[in-house]
Amino acid sequence: MTVLRTSLRNFVAHKGRMLLSGVAVVLSVAFVCGTLVFTDTMNTTFDRLFSQTAADVTVSAKGAESDGQPGTGRPATVPGSLLEELEGVEGVSSVSGGAYSTSVTVVNADNENMGSSTGAPTIASNWTEIDEKSMEVTEGRLPRGAGEVMVDADTAKKHGLELGEELRTISALGDFRAEIVGVAAFRSTNPGATVVYFDTDTVQERLLGDSDAYTDVYVMAAGDVSDEKLKERVVAALGSGEYKVRTQEEYAAEGKDEIGSFLDVIKYALLGFAGIALLVGVFLIVNTFSMLVAQRTREIGLMRAIGSSRRQVNRSVLVEAVLLGVLGSLVGVAAGVGLAMGLMELMGLVGMNLSTDDLTLRWVTPVVGVVLGVVVTVLAAYLPARRAGRVSPMAALRDDGLPAAGSRVGRVRSGVGLVLTLAGAGALVVAAGSDDAAGGSLFLAAGVVLTLVGFVLVGPLLAGGVVRVLGAVVLRVFGPVGRMAERNALRNPRRTGATGAALMIGLALVASLSVVGASLVASAGDELDRSVGADFILQSSAGQPVVPEAVERVRGTEGVEHVTEYRWLEARLTGPDGETVEEPVTAASATYAEDLRVETVAGELPAAYERDSMSVPEDFAKAHGVEVGDRVEVDFAAGGTAELTVRAITAADTSVDQGAMYLSTATAERYVPEDRMPLNMMLFAKAEEGQEDAAYAALKKELEPFPQYEVRNQADYKELLEDQVGQLLNMVYGLLALAIVVAVLGVVNTLALSVVERTREIGLMRAIGLSRRQLRRMIRLESVVIALFGALLGLGLGLGWGVAAQRLLALEGLKVLQVPWPTIAGVFVGAAVVGLVAALVPAFRAGRMNVLNAIATE
């Protein structure tokens, strides 16, 4: 009880000093809990949506695409006769036919695409009893015939659509116009899809191409018949294996599986950044307790002199850590819920609507947050607590504070740090020179961890040399004030090293990712220049196939020399070794050999586009013993089986279309029926000599009626890639900013506690003539040099990581090393600014000290 009372008294007495460490705990726990609440809420949203949009039993075509977007542009269907057949099954209360397509684009009167910008589909459907479960008509009425359409309320609000306006729907079967006669709102949350409703006949004729077909048949159970029992009866009536039959639970589980990997990526990425922030927070907590213990040396010595044991002193400090962890964690849990709501609002701004009504806070989330916060805080405080337990009772008679760790301990720490750093550097060198991506990645991971730990341990040793160099370059111009700032930073190398290390971690990740990102853009641009001979690439940013009408418009464009079609076909291939593998094959026009300059290790690529011929990649040829002239059996999923002769083996040393198997469109057409032939995924075009600019403008004009497609020349493509990489890096930098904020708090905390520690010294300096302005400048300069020390370590470490990662990724096509020096320089200058900002409050407090009171401080 005495230990607890002492801990409470000390905690309250130093509550201001604990505050910044508490903020680090709060931020880290908030990020973890916010991530868990956000992903749980997304799971709840999609679970509810899938449950509401599923019948008791759903019957679909066996070959229906899992993503609902077939390559042909027309969904797989079941015959309308199934409705009558299933109505007679025992236990069925009602049967309805659903007809829908996701291979559509809907545009308004201004030719603007009404689809989502987040990758969510555009769904064109008929209205069924299933839709009545998930939607309600809020304006107007249901469509009653051709030329009428109803839209979802979220899309109407986002694009300002009103009753009476006209929409145009583009599909593989052509386009048609319809007037908005109704608006329907989701009863639960719409995650961002655009939904339009037509009458059943319109969907069947315009989107399915069959007036007596449906994509799904919805079967509802009567009375107390279970879904599983009803499924058994439906399967018995239809025959096993002819159709895809799912219960409501299976339908929802399948839908959840499709988005599960996406949600997992978000969850683990956010938790990874939370872990980085937590690691940085450890340095802050260690520094805080180390300095508090040092400042209370006499107090601890007195406690030891009057009978407190080492164990009691140790426990007293750990109890303070528990209090800090508990309070910080509880606030962090509450902040995490707020963060999750903020993330939901942010997702709403980009088109994915998540309602706070679905906010999900499972009991495990606060438990994880509190346990994590407390455990990490206690572990971080353990070493300072042990150091406090070693304080001698004689320390009550001294006034020199807690002695620094012995020189032997410092030498051992530095020695271990140097060994780990050298081992990590060796692992990075091995990774950079590896010929195997999988094995090299293990060395890269080991190198990153070892060099990071090594730099943390060797930080105090580096602080002496690096701070002196920085002082000579940056601080000496400020005269005596600059020299005093340098000496203050050198006074406790361990403290300076730990404070700089917290900033080092975040900046190392920024530097390494910058190198990889810049190298990715440079490598892709180089590969584009070397490999792509086409002048223009035409495709949908949302991955939709190119409809036939758009293809014809491109073919008829003035100034275009040739147009290359490009399709993907699913197939099973059986090589000379008799082994069968499922691989997609690429069917393209013969001109693709000109549009993509692919090197071969055997044969000539143009020969692969001859009748009943193909090419295979080098890896496939080695794995299955294929040589030029061998025959490969190709069983097309959408057609028949062909015996094709291998005319070329393409080199693996490429990043554009790596691993593709080529054959001509004419060959594919011999074995795949026209109505089952996939649409083009993209088109390539070559301009006539000297007509590049004119053809570019003409192609854009021809495709104006199809806003889902983009026409890009090589410069556009490079810019697109640069923008995509830039957006990804900016998002990552934004998440890393949390770790950097915690590191900045560490600098603030170090300076604030250092000012308290040096109160008498500051009073004496003021007494002998140091002005308030000079005092504040000294503290600011000390902060700047600590921040620049951390930046130098972080940027140097990050450049090493980035270069090693690029050399390893060169095996996958990332062949050009590009170091973004402007970014590196900007980060270094930004670190100085961070140092200035971090010093504002401590410098202000130091400047306000009363000189006499400061001198009288014990």
Image (cartoon, rainbow, N blue to C red):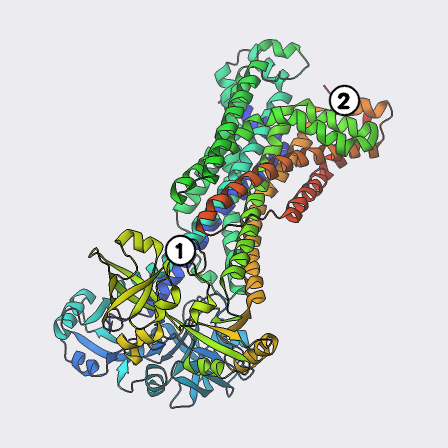
**Count of numbered circles in the view:** 2
Q: From the viewer's perspective, is 432 left or right of 629?
A: right
- Quick check: 808 above or below 539? above
Choose mark 2 or mark 1, whichever is in front. Answer: 1
Q: Residue 693 carries which label?
A: none
- Residue 498, image x and y in percent? 59, 30
Q: Name which residue type carries label 2.
A: Glu
Residue found at x 37% / y 85%: 206
Report the residue marked by disc 1.
Answer: 651
Q: Name which residue type carries label 1.
A: Ala
Q: Is mark 1 on a helix, strand or loop?
A: loop
Q: From the viewer's perspective, is 762 left or right of 728?
A: right
- Residue 649, image x and y in percent? 35, 59
Of 759 and 562, which appears nearest the observer?
Answer: 562
- Residue 294, image x and y in percent? 62, 21
Residue found at x 45% / y 42%: 369
- Quick check: 803 above or below 468? below
Of 669 and 419, which appears nearest the observer?
Answer: 669
Q: What element carries label 2?
A: helix
- Residue 702, image x and y in percent? 53, 82
Q: Residue furthest right?
A: 769
